[in-house]
Image (tube, grey):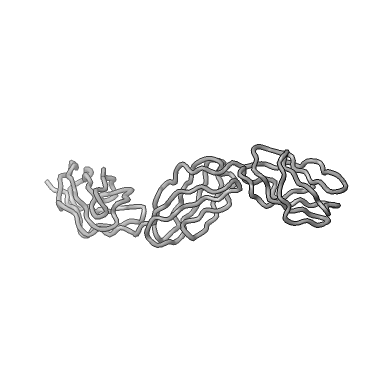
Amino acid sequence: MPIDPDQGSSGGGSTVTFTGTALGGATAVRFGDRPATITENSATSVSVVSPSGAGVVGATVTTPGGTSGPVPFYYIPPPVVVAVTPASGPVSGGSAITVTGRHLGTAESIHFGTTVVTPTVVDDQQLTVLTPVTAAGTVPLVVTTRGGVANASFSFVDPPAVTAFSPPTGLPAGGTLVSITGTNLSTPTSVTFDGLPAVFAALSDTQIAALAPAHGLGTAAIVVTTTGGSDTAPGFFIYLL
């Protein structure tokens, strides 16, 4: 006797349908030793709301003609989200993020605020998903599985705008402390001088401190990349003796 779905939340509340023959007048449906609530019944099907439970149990249907043989029903524990990496991304969407945790293998959807996307299940501990287009700000991130829901959050970030840096020059050996100013700078992932990576730290949403890397004599463009995008500073940093 088919059962659909054959798995549901350990907390109960799943709608489950049994199909077969001679099911009319069903008087009881049990998941293991626990009764389910019958919601619909015909000669070929019985729909119920599953009770709470754990593990794998045998589900049976009882009619005036007798009790069916048990069919397996798998209880799924509620999901747990441990981390969302990265925790922010661009308002333009399309950023690949990874959700890690436990009991994620039956994930059906992820809500970013009011926007729903379909994740890719890597395994029971990991999901990947592309972020949608959303206005700047932090929104609830809700993972829905057959075992229930888990809550986290995700921040959508406007692209950075670099307006100035100081000082404008430094030595070829590197090590000059450069203050980079602008807007939307609080989530930097890299700062480069002519493509060379610099050591950096975000001081605020409007300022980044970076140590200029070693570079030959001449000019270097400073590019700041954040989880919201990239921007090139106006002018050039000049390496001179």
Find the residue positioned furthest to the right: 65
The residue drawn where x is 19% and y is 50% is 179
Find the residue positioned furthest to the left: 241
Q: Nearer the viewer, residue 126 or 78?
A: 78
Quick check: 156 left or right of 221? right
The residue drawn where x is 19% and y is 48% is 178
Residue 182 falls in which quadrant of the image? bottom left
Query: Residue 116, how many percent across, how many down?
Result: 52, 58
Query: Residue 213, how many percent across, how many down?
Result: 23, 44
The residue drawn where x is 44% and y is 43% is 83
How many marks can you see?
0
Q: Nearer the viewer, residue 117 or 24?
A: 24
Quick check: 35 left or right of 199? right
Quick check: 105 left or right of 100? right
Question: With respect to residue 104, does 236 lie above or below?
Answer: below
Query: Residue 202, how many percent across, how many down?
Result: 26, 48
Residue 198 falls in which quadrant of the image? top left
Q: Nearer the viewer, residue 129 or 165?
A: 129
Query: Residue 104, how many percent across, how many down?
Result: 55, 44
Q: Nearer the viewer, residue 29 or 107?
A: 29
